[in-house]
Image (spheres, helix red, strand yellow):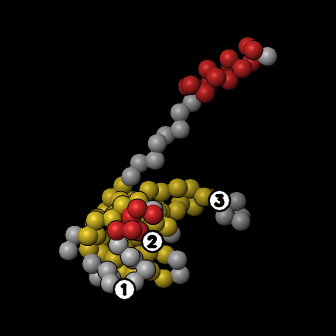
Amino acid sequence: MKTLMIFFIALAAFIKVPPTQEMTIEATYVGFEEGIYTFIDGDELEYEFSDIDVKAAEKYDLNSDEYVGKKFKVGYETDTEVDENDEEYRVYYIVDLELLD
């Protein structure tokens, strides 16, 4: 039993979960609709975020129309989730915001 425990501890030391990497974009805030925060960057690419970190939400109230049309530096992370059909999909969530204009 002791040998088995040592084996699992050694195995756990070699298996590393990659850290989540924060990415950033500069994009214009389009609005909040049906639980999604939408931004569009300079290349007209649309970014939809399903959640926002509490600290980022405290900086700017994106649920109001006050910041629609404003440009932000958006720090975000992604995660993979599984839907009801066992299909994986990416979820984007905001971790930091900085108003640029």
Mark 2 or 3, nearer chain start: 2
Classify 10 Å Cα crowding around label 2: few (below 14), some (14-19), many (20 and above).
some
Which residue is at 71% across, 64% downward? 85
Which residue is at 66% across, 64% downward? 83
Classify 10 Å Cα crowding around label 1: few (below 14), some (14-19), many (20 and above).
few
| Residue 7 versus residue 85 in the image, above or below | above
Mark 1 or 2, nearer chain start: 2
Q: Amino acid at mark 1?
A: Asp
Specify the label residue 65 is tagged with. 1
Depth check, mark 1 against mark 2: the one in front is: 1
Position in image of residue 49 (x %, y %): 46, 69
Specify the label residue 48 is tagged with. 2
Which residue is at 36% across, 80% downward? 30
Q: Amino acid at mark 3?
A: Val
Between residue 87 and residue 75, name the one nearer to us.
75
Which residue is at 68% across, 23% downward? 8
Q: CA distance from mark 1 to mark 2?
A: 17 Å
Give SS at disc 2: strand
Q: CA distance from mark 1 to mark 3?
A: 32 Å
Q: Residue furthest left?
A: 101
Tag 1 and tag 2, C-beta contact below 8 Å: no
Q: Is residue 37 visible?
A: yes
**Residue at the disc numbered 3:** 82
Specify the label residue 74 is tagged with. none
